[in-house]
Amino acid sequence: MNNEISTKNPLGENPVNSLLYQFAVPSIIAMLVSSLYNIVDQFFIGRSVGALGNAATNISFPLSISCVAIALLFGIGGASAFNIAMGMGEKENAVNYLANSAAMLFLGGVALTAVTLIFLEPLLKFFGSPDNVLEYAKVYTRIVALGFPFLIFTSGGGHLIRADGRPKISMVCNLAGALINTVLDALFVFVLNMGMAGAAYATIIGQIVSGLMAAWYLAHCRTIKIKKENLRVRRKYISRVMSLGTAPCANQLAMMVVQIVMNKSLKYYGSLSVYGESIPIACAGIITKVNQVFMSFIIGISQGLQPITSFNYGAGRYGR
């Protein structure tokens, strides 16, 4: 039965090399564009606000890492569970895995937004914010936190869209948000002189558009049909999803800890130097954004490989 099902799905039939190219290239492009628009964001903030603005975005960066962690927990976990179930011929379970994951992505974003807004100042201080950066960080983070549900849904939903066999759609969702963010950055920051708030509003508008595009596609998947009852979160499905997504999520959480420790270290040792507390944090933030460009290739390849390996594992075709 598994072999019969696998031949009806390109993931179980087409040559692995061509599948990897088909899935990995759009993922790499999406990751590259996302990395580049983060750099552009730093450019606009640096030119309009200065080093304190760049430092502020780096102070809030642990929250962005938290968004990625949630996206991986339910995105990678949900995509893996979905593809494995499809490979095994368990289509009803596959629908529930994907729908439950999509619901948890949005709910996780709402929860993170609430926690961030309630504990905003204590969190930013815990992340290592110097006193002269705190107000900039509060302005920026208070706004971008409103976009967390859409950021998480776009990032995690991209994995679900690829799992449905549409890597180019996932790429387009990311590209649309990046393009909108870049254009609005120039408008809000340079033309309207909105400073940190302008950069933040540009960011969340792009995220909202991307999130809505991802949601629209998931409501019209190619291989399955999601119904309202599938969106009801059930422990049976979420526990399986989380078991598959825990490893990448934990990796991101470890990176968040490293980021916080680095911010605190830069604040302490920077205060002992001629540069002060803020400039080292700003420099580290810019370097981190540039480093993401190089990581895009590795991450893109791994994202492209996931649907192929998961489906064939579920189908019992271990040779592929």
Image (cartoon, rainbow, N blue to C red):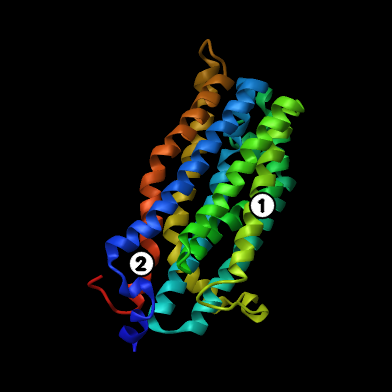
- As rendered, which of 224 and 77 lies closer to the eye? 224
Q: Is residue 112 visible?
A: no
**Residue at the limit of the structure toward the bottom, as seen here:** 1
- As rendered, which of 263 and 180 lies closer to the eye? 180
Query: What residue sits 56% from the left and 72% below the top?
Result: 221
Q: Which mark is residue 101?
A: none
Q: Which residue, given by chain and number where applicable, does mark 1 sit on?
A: 209
Residue 259 percent coordinates (x, y): 50, 37
Secondary structure found at label 2: helix
> Are there few (<14), some (14-19), or many (20+) residues within 10 Å of tag 2?
many
- As rendered, which of 213 and 1 lies closer to the eye? 213
Q: Earlier in the sequence, mark 2 or mark 1?
A: 1
The image shows residue 241, relative to residue 294, as above or below, that is: below
Q: Is residue 31 visible?
A: yes
Query: What residue sits 66% from the left and 26% below the top?
Result: 133
The image shows residue 262, relative to residue 25, as above or below, that is: above
Q: Is residue 64 left or right of residue 3?
A: right
In which quadrant is the N terminus drawn?
bottom left
In which quadrant is the C terminus drawn?
bottom left
Query: What residue sits 31% from the left and 84% below the top?
Result: 3
The image shows residue 193, relative to residue 100, as above or below, that is: above
Q: Which residue, given by chain and number where applicable, does mark 2 sit on?
A: 308
Residue 113 percent coordinates (x, y): 69, 51
Residue 314 percent coordinates (x, y): 36, 77
**Residue at the limit of the structure toward the top, as seen here:** 274
Q: Amino acid at mark 2?
A: Ile
> Are there few (<14), some (14-19), or many (20+) residues within 10 Å of tag 1?
many
Residue 210 percent coordinates (x, y): 62, 53
Q: Amino acid at mark 1?
A: Val
